[in-house]
């Protein structure tokens, strides 16, 4: 009986699991092996233990890439959540043309990283960018992103918030819509102010959804590559590298597969740690949405 | 009281304007600039009124023929990846929706976790493998990669949507002598269409826009449109911003229109895909 059922469902499960096994799982495990060896193109690998990890973890370029990534993740993702939350509350408070506004907010979701870089590069062009010009006209400081590494990181952060705000907004907004209106009525009858209703009703009930949005965005911001690569290629002098660019440079520019693999596995571990937190959150059943 | 309401209204209006500006200005600005005559692109202050011209588009057509090859490649790869991801996800999602058990539960959890592994990690081992298999610079390589990175989310989504279809329908069809595949195709899939569309939105937007895999796994024959645009940016000193804007607009408009029309499924997919599992 059990066997029969297995025989029946296996063919249906096979395509998904074969794809994932051959494209993601086995290659990821192979990365572990690569990370314990020194190898390059056309060179026989030899086992070196944890030496690659040591090399990466003591490499100043990795430290700078990790610091850039962590600052980017912490600043951009939390800023994005705060803005997303504000927008979700604004939408929930009742707006005219809500469907149109919703579609407008979703629009950046359709934009590729490459096209977004074209847009923002021009908007912030040091000589002719309209935003640079506007800032200058108001006597405000401009972003000197092609020379100043911290400004470049700022622009990368803005770009990544712009691309991903639709996601964060939708998650928080859907959770806000799922809060029954009676709760606010009850709060009002009990004499709660708007602020108290927000503190005691909205925030606690949005908590799980905001945590989910945060975890997803941590995971996705941690692997950020294209925006940074297309804007600065990690330069000047490797100062705006993020971890994914560090990995790419090690592997494809310096042919150092061992250290690249060690970096990759560090990325996997960090992602799995965050993913574990996410799954725990899902399984605790704290999240439910009315559909 | 009335002034307070007025103030709140004004505050909201300002917030809405800020949101619209933030979301739409970059898009509208490059689309508009792609129609400006050359010297007007850099006009200070920016020109809002100008005689629109398709000069940059004509120039794009003449000097960047490779961009249009890229569009065709993007289209083929997007269609292939979408079909593969939908068929595979629908089959697996059906199993997960209609069966339960320790192993199934564990493997579904595995799918959710594996989805969160950074794609750049697998480029490292896959690069030599793809070369060895002769798949380097082919459409097939990108189709397989793109579909694979969405089948886990696709499976979870299909399961969520199929869970809402009553099992009695399967049973009735089964009594009528329909096979499992027939039930899936004729009964379940039509009812799970919102789920199929949600998966389609994700895969289509991702495959059409993806940069990293295309950058690493293609060179000339299978080069996608985003990659060609990135090469235009790369030669920025020599490149005409007008041509770049035209290319970016051509790349963006189809997928933007698609997302606008499919916004309901995108919203449903985003919420179900991250809060169910």
Image: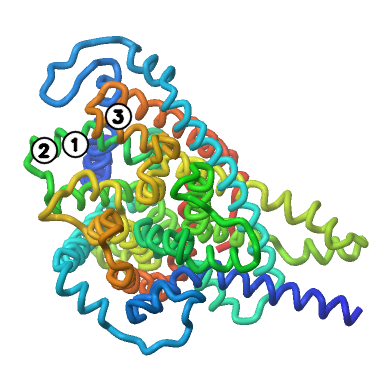
- Describe the element under mark 3 as helix, strand or loop: helix
What residue appears at the point 58 percent right and 53 percent down from the top-left corner?
A80
Residue occupying the far bottom of the picture: B51
Q: Quadrant of residue A83?
A: bottom right
- Describe the element under mark 1 as helix, strand or loop: helix
Q: Chain of mark 3?
A: A
Q: Are marks 1 and 3 on the same chain?
A: no
Q: Chain of mark 1?
A: B
Q: Quadrant of residue B185?
A: bottom left
What residue appears at the point 48 percent right and 52 percent down from the top-left corner?
A160
Where is residue B130? Give x, y as percent: 14, 39
Residue topped by disc 3:
A250
Please tell me how crowded label 1 is: few (under 14), some (14-19), or many (20+) other residues with Cα within 10 Å. Answer: some
Please tell me how crowded label 3 is: few (under 14), some (14-19), or many (20+) other residues with Cα within 10 Å. Answer: some
Where is residue A142? Give x, y as percent: 57, 57
Residue A187 in the figure: left or right of residue A173: right
Visual colour scheme: rainbow
Contact flag, marks 1 and 2 (Cβ < 8 Å): yes
Residue B131's disc number: 2
């Amino acid at each position: 009986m059990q066997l029969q059922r297995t025989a029946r469902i296996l063919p249906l499960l096979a395509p998904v699991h074969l794809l994932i096994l051959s494209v993601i799982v086995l290659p990821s495990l192979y990365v572990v092996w690569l990370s314990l060896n020194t190898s390059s193109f056309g060179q026989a690998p030899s086992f070196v233990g944890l030496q690659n990890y040591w090399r990466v973890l003591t490499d100043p370029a990795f430290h700078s890439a990790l610091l850039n990534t962590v600052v980017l993740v912490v600043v951009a993702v939390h800023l994005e959540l705060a803005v997303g939350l504000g927008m979700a509350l604004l939408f929930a408070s009742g707006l005219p043309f809500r469907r149109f506004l919703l579609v407008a907010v979703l629009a950046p979701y359709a934009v590729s990283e490459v096209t977004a870089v074209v847009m923002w590069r021009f908007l912030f062009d040091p000589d002719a960018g309209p935003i640079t010009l506007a800032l200058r006209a108001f006597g405000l400081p401009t972003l000197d992103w092609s020379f100043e590494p911290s400004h470049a990181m700022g622009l990368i952060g803005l770009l990544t918030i712009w691309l991903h705000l639709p996601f964060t907004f939708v998650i928080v907004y859907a959770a806000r819509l799922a809060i029954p209106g009676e709760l606010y009525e009850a709060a009002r009858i009990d004499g709660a102010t708007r602020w108290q209703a927000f503190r005691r009703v909205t925030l606690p009930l949005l908590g799980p959804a905001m945590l989910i949005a945060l975890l997803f965005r941590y995971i996705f911001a941690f692997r950020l590559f294209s925006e940074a690569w297309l804007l600065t290629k990690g330069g000047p002098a490797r100062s705006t590298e993020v971890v994914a660019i560090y990995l790419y440079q090690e592997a494809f520019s310096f042919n150092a597969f061992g250290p690249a693999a060690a970096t990759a596995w560090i990325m996997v571990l960090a992602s799995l740690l965050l993913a574990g937190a996410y799954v725990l959150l899902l399984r605790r059943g704290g999240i439910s949405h009315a559909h | 009281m009335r002034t307070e309401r007025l103030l709140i209204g004004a505050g909201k209006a300002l917030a809405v304007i800020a949101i619209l500006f933030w979301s739409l200005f970059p898009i509208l600005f490059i689309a508009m600039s792609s129609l400006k005559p050359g010297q007007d692109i850099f006009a200070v202050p920016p020109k809002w009124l100008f005689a629109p011209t398709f000069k940059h588009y004509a120039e794009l057509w003449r000097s960047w023929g490779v961009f249009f090859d890229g569009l065709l490649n993007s289209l083929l790869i997007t269609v292939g990846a979408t079909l593969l991801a939908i068929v595979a996800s629908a089959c697996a999602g059906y199993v997960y929706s209609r069966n339960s058990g320790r192993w199934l539960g564990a493997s579904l959890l595995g799918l959710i976790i594996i989805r969160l592994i950074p794609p750049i990690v697998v480029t490292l081992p896959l690069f030599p493998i793809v070369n060895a298999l002769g798949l380097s610079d082919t459409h097939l390589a990108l189709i397989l990669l793109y579909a694979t990175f969405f089948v886990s989310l696709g499976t979870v989504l299909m399961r969520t949507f199929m869970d809402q279809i009553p099992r009695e329908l399967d049973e009735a069809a089964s009594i009528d002598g329909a096979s499992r595949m027939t039930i899936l195709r004729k009964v379940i899939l039509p009812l799970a269409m919102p789920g199929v569309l949600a998966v389609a939105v994700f895969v289509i937007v991702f495959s059409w826009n993806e940069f990293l895999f295309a950058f690493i796994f293609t060179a000339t024959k299978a080069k996608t449109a985003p990659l060609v645009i990135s090469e235009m940016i790369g030669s920025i000193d020599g490149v005409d911003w007008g041509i770049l804007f035209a290319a970016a607009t051509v790349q963006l408009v189809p997928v933007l229109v698609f997302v606008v029309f499919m916004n309901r499924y995108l919203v449903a997919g985003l919420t179900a895909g991250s809060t169910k599992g």
